[in-house]
Image (cartoon, rainbow, N blue to C red):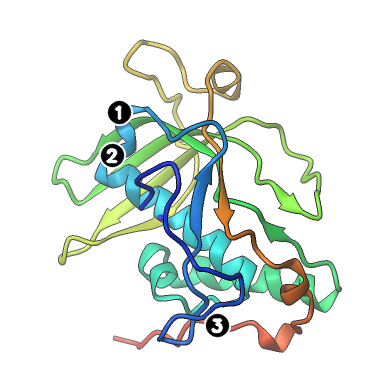
């Protein structure tokens, strides 16, 4: 969700499909240059970026069975993402997301046993087509709880603010006002998502993840 350069290699056309039947993974083009933040290469941050990438990719294609998506998020969250797209298609108000959620990691707090971490970040609004005002204040703060499985893979299990103020290493409190003073990198998908293709889908065309097995 990982991003490694100014322009990543992507699909040749927006409607191209990979060999497994899913839409080909798009590349990324950085609007004002690739991120220079040293936390960009941190494994926990890469997991968050992958999660936000796959969320936008799945939403644009109405395919929530993407293996990359199911590896990055828990089942409940994925189904909530899918329900939103189903509702928008039902009401004929679909939109595509032009790039992953812009975010600047500012801290990574790893648990003592190394099995999880909180990634704190400044985030900015998604750019969509058609444009929409979600009514939120931007930029804002996000806190991602990332868990590591026994096989070493990472999954975002929640994205909620802690109950206590989050203090950065320089002593500043992480707040939306703090995020006003930083540059949050933004990338767009290459090729761009296809709004017309999404608009032709119905609620029933949304592909859900496979049912999870009960233990």
The label on residue 68 is none
SS type, badge 1: helix
SS type, badge 3: loop
Does residue 20 appear to the left or right of 30 in the view shown?
A: left
* Residue beneath the point at 86% across and 73% down: 92
Residue at the spot of label 3: 208
Of the two numbered discs 2 and 3 on the same chain, state the one appearing first in sequence.
2
Assess whether mark 3 and mark 2 are in contact (beta carbons under 8 angstroms). no
Residue at the spot of label 2: 41
Residue at the spot of label 1: 38
In the displayed orientation, state which residue is furthest to the top: 171
Does residue 104 appear to the left or right of 100 in the view shown?
A: left
Q: Image height check: is 118 above or below 74?
A: above
* Residue beneath the point at 52% across and 69% down: 78
Q: Position of residue 151 (x, y in %)?
A: 16, 66
SS type, badge 2: helix
Occupied quadrant, residue 181: top right
Occupied quadrant, residue 192: bottom right
**Label 1 environment density (alpha carbons within 10 Å; few <14, some 14–19, many ≥20):** few
Assess whether mark 2 and mark 1 are in contact (beta carbons under 8 angstroms). yes
């Amino acid at each position: 969700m990982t991003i490694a350069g100014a322009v990543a290699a992507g699909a040749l056309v927006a409607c191209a499909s990979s060999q497994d039947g899913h839409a080909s993974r798009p590349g990324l083009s950085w609007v004002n240059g690739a991120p220079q933040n040293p936390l960009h290469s941190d494994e926990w941050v890469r997991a968050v970026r992958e999660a936000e990438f796959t969320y936008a990719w799945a939403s644009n294609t109405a395919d929530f069975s993407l293996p990359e998506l199911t590896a990055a998020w828990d089942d409940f969250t994925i189904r909530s993402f899918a329900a939103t797209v189903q509702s928008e298609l039902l009401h004929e108000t679909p939109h595509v997301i032009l790039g992953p959620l812009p975010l600047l990691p500012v801290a990574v707090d790893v648990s003592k046993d190394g099995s999880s971490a909180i990634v704190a970040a400044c985030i900015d609004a998604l750019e969509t087509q058609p444009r929409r005002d979600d009514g939120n204040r931007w930029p804002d703060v996000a806190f991602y709880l990332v868990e590591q499985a026994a096989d070493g893979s990472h999954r975002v299990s929640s994205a909620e603010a802690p109950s206590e103020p989050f203090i950065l290493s320089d002593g500043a409190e992480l707040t939306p006002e703090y995020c006003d003073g930083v540059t949050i990198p933004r990338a767009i998908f290459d090729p761009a998502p296809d709004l017309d293709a999404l608009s032709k889908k119905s609620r029933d065309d949304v592909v859900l993840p496979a049912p999870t097995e009960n233990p």
